[in-house]
Image: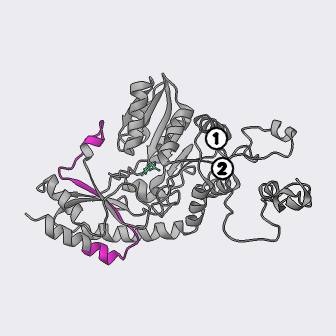
Amino acid sequence: MTQETRKPQDVPEANGWHRQTNVLHADTHIPAGFSAMPAPVARASTVVFPDLAAMRALDWKNDSQWRYGLHATPTSMELMQRLAAIEGGRHCLLFPSGLAAIANVYFALVKSGDDVLIPDNAYSPNRDHGDWLKEDFGVSVRYYDPLVGAGIADLIQPNTKLIWIEAPGSVTMEVPDVPAIAKVARDRGIPTAIDNTYSAGLAFAPFHHGVDISVQALTKYQSGGSDVLMGAVTTVDDDLHHHLKRARMRMGWGVSADDCSLLLRSLPSLKLRFEAHDRSALALATWLKHRPEITAVLHPAFADCPGNAFFKRDFTGAGGLFSVVFDGRFPGAQIDAFVEGLRLFKIGFSWGGAHSLAVPYKVPLMRTVTSWPHKGGLVRFYVGLEDVRDLQADIEASLKAHLVG
Ligand SMILES: *Cc1c(COP(=O)(O)O)cnc(C)c1O
């Protein structure tokens, strides 16, 4: 090529490289002197090492080393540290969903021949995971009365390797005596894992009460936008953290920096949102207690909720969830019509976002070792951030329209 026909792209630039190479190798660091409140979004699969010695010195247990985007980036690390701080933990791991976080606890701690105890009112997909391990992987899985307390001692076998706790059950709201269960387990060297999603990690401090592992669906209140799926596993103990971290690496679970940054954006308002949900839910639940169509309002803050004494002792708030049981004279179809007749309460799973939700559940089909005392159908409400007067009017209108007789 002669000098005259060479295009600018073909002429080496001042540093000796061509334009295309310089575009790729631009300095990707945040310039010194720039400072802002939001955590920067660090997207990465490859993490680059300054030299081979640094690469070879990697130790998978060392959380302060950057190794591979799947394991951590500065954005996910920032989120992990803030989540651990909220619950009073020391380590946190992120997962692509709350259920993936639950699955990881099983993979880390349980092998064939082991035994697991799960509360009878546990989040249904956790139960289903337990059933799967039992059917296909040679794990013994047994369900227990969530109100068993220290009586859990009688259920423990030599091969029991994990005890799940959920406080409260997110449909039927029984509140377990967490410290009593945790103490029995700790005395026998069996790790306990709590599904702490209900409390958003704010209203219940699992490690203070002797629990070893806290699992949360960040999909709920931490996201707050009904738009991000993510889960967390938080711990205090180093060895336990390494066990869980190893399982996570082996399973290949990862989260995106973009999703982490959405959660980091929502976290500052987590407490205020939780308290607003709590206030509105309590107001609606109190009003519903006096409705003639309803025989029971299941809210942990109410004296007649099983485990209310533990709730008062251990929790600082309740958030937006509660359930009602309708009078047995109303057939399921009429309760379905009530739910479909709501305009502000949408029909859908999950919760923690701004919008109110309502879902009917068939509780007797969801448990196997405890009996359900109620005859009528159950509807769980999630109370969002709408004006509570409109939510009350919405429920009242649908009750009047559909629950006659
Ligand atoms: C939603 C939920 C989960 C699972 O979260 P996903 O992110 O939807 O997988 C786990 N436990 C409880 C109590 C939940 O409500």
Residue found 56% across the figure and 44% down from its top: 213
Residue 103 drawn at (x, y percent) = 50, 38
Q: CA distance from mark 2 to mark 1?
A: 9 Å
Colour mapping used in the image: one colour
Magenta region includes residue 21: no
Q: Is residue 369 left or right of residue 79?
A: left
Q: Nearer the viewer, residue 378 or 205?
A: 378
Q: Which residue is mark 2?
A: 90
Q: The magenta stretch spans which residues?
A: 365-393
Residue 251 drawn at (x, y percent) = 57, 36
User: Is residue 324 shown above or below 388?
Assistant: above
Residue found 57% across the figure and 49% down from its top: 207
Give the mark, 2 or 1, whose residue is nearer the N terminus: 2
Q: Nearer the viewer, residue 6 or 33?
A: 6
Does the residue tagged 1 have its C-beta within 8 Å of any atom of ligand 1?
no
Q: Nearer the viewer, residue 303 or 271?
A: 271
* Numbered label attached to residue 241: 1
Amino acid tagged 2? Arg
Amino acid tagged 1? His
Does the residue tagged 2 have its C-beta within 8 Å of any atom of ligand 1?
no
Q: Is residue 113 visible?
A: yes
Q: Secondary structure at mark 1?
A: helix
Q: How many marks?
A: 2
Q: Residues within 10 Å of mark 1 (few under 14, many from 20)?
A: many
Magenta region includes residue 389: yes
User: Is residue 168 shown above or below 365?
Assistant: below
Q: Residues within 10 Å of mark 2 (few under 14, many from 20)?
A: some
Residue 345 drawn at (x, y percent) = 31, 66
Q: Which image quadrant: the C terminus?
A: bottom left
